[in-house]
Image (spheres, rainbow, N blue to C red):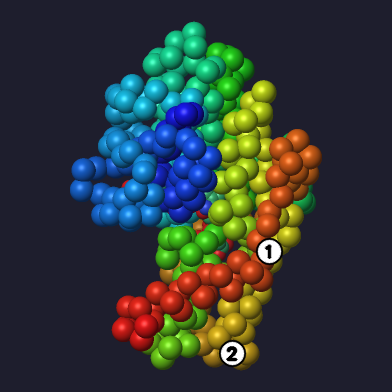
Amino acid sequence: MPRALITGITGQDGLYLAELLLSKGYEVYGFMRGQNNPKRELVESTVPDVKLLTGDLTDLSSLMRALEASQPDEFYNLGAISFVAYSWENAHVTSEVTGQGVLNALESVRLFAGKDAHTIRFYQASSSEMFGKVQQVPQSEETLLWPRSPYGVAKVFGHYMTINYRESYGMHASSGILFNHESPRRGPEFVTRKISQAVARISLGLQDSITLGNLDARRDWGFAGDYVEAMWLMLQQDEADDYVISTNETHEIREYLDLAFAHVGIEDWEPLVKQDPRFMRPAEVDLLIGDSTKARTTLGWNPKVDFPSLVTMMVDSDLAEQKRLVGLS
Ligand code: NAP
Ligand code: F7E
């Protein structure tokens, strides 16, 4: 039975990846912060077969202990401070967790396994935020990186550190440059979930309006369930490498609003959406659109959920949750 260790197990991708690996017969270990983590219950109820280990990406010794306890064949480093807006307010801790945390994870594998470090296949969760002020459209593995947020800068550090450990120590370390991917498990601070939750509440008469920031930004949005499959495929290759994972389509936030409101029968949503500079960013990433040709041809990966289906999936899930919360179902 193959064994996998996942950092970021309480997050959106951690849960989907754990489900995928369990379905493939893996023994799965989840690395989680704190003995009193409020998300422990969620993990225990969603993926009860995952064995939980506690620690922190900023603490090398806790990663070493997790490796000792799990003896993994595959190590998926998904843990990070992942909210871009927050990274300006807390740039230092973002660099420690999202940046140096990757170094700790790589170093823990090298120290733990020594000359056998290549036998633990390593996945790093890199991000399209690294493209920032885009230098090429669409963005591929060859596109120059120009991060526009402390989060993006930290991800660039982790990305190159992963490549460096591959080249210096022969580690099987791969980096997935994932474009935005969403789901009903997306944190409510991210724009897609913020909208799906608000649309559900507005349609049920529980909320009057929603307040957003910049509506002109464009993103290449996919479904998280599809994207974790790409992570797994990367670690099944003989050679480690870097891959862009994206739908190759870009959509404005307004299009997401159009589809989400239309799904609950509201066509004229403009009066329901307010804008507040509080949700604007000091520097914006305006246009993200990925070119995932390499992943499609080499890994045989293809996204299955398209943009309209993603939006309706998220709104339907929030409608069900809101109805449950107010006792309507
Ligand atoms: P998420 O839902 O925000 O999950 C982040 C996870 O990191 C949580 O489990 C969190 O644990 C954990 N974490 C935070 N600080 C930690 C620390 N100091 N030590 C250990 N764990 C810590 O993120 P996601 O959407 O699943 O994304 C997974 C990874 O992919 C992240 O690295 C993210 O940056 C990257 N990524 C995401 C996207 C996307 O669109 N979703 C795109 C590209 C790359 P707590 O519950 O304890 O906070
Ligand atoms: O913002 C705009 C905002 O916070 C998307 C993370 O998973 O994907 C994610 O980062 C866009 C931005 O995601 C609001 O200005 C407008 O242009 O949903 P988001 P993100 O910043 O793209 C990348 C690939 C990651 O790696 C990250 O970890 O939406 N926007 N109004 C807003 N955004 C938010 N959050 N809230 C608003 O009210």
Q: Which mark is residue 306?
A: 1
Q: Amino acid at mark 1?
A: Asp
Marks 2 and 1: CB-CB under 8 Å? Answer: no
- Report the side of 250 relative to 90 (left or right): right
Badge 2 or badge 1: first in the primary sequence: 2
Vertical position of residue 171 compared to residue 181: above or below: above
Question: Which residue shows up at 39% across the image and 78% down it?
Answer: 322
Q: Is residue 135 above or below residue 283?
A: above
Residue visible at 40% across and 74% down? 321
Query: Residue 187's image quarter?
Result: bottom left
Q: Amino acid at mark 2?
A: Gly
Badge number at residue 51: none
Residue 320 versus residue 176: which sits nearer the camera?
Answer: 320
Q: Is residue 187 left or right of residue 249?
A: left
Residue 71, horizontal then vertical, whole percent: 39, 23
In screen coordinates, is 264 left or right of 59?
A: right
Frontmost residue, 280 versus 323: 323
Instruction: Decide if residue 32 is in sight here.
Output: yes
Q: Residue furthest left?
A: 36
Residue 311 lies, in percent from the top left, at 59, 71
Outermost residue to the top: 115
- Whole-angstrom CA distance, mark 2 to mark 1, is 21 Å
Question: Do we see residue 60 in this rendering?
Answer: no
**To which residue does mark 2 refer?**
265
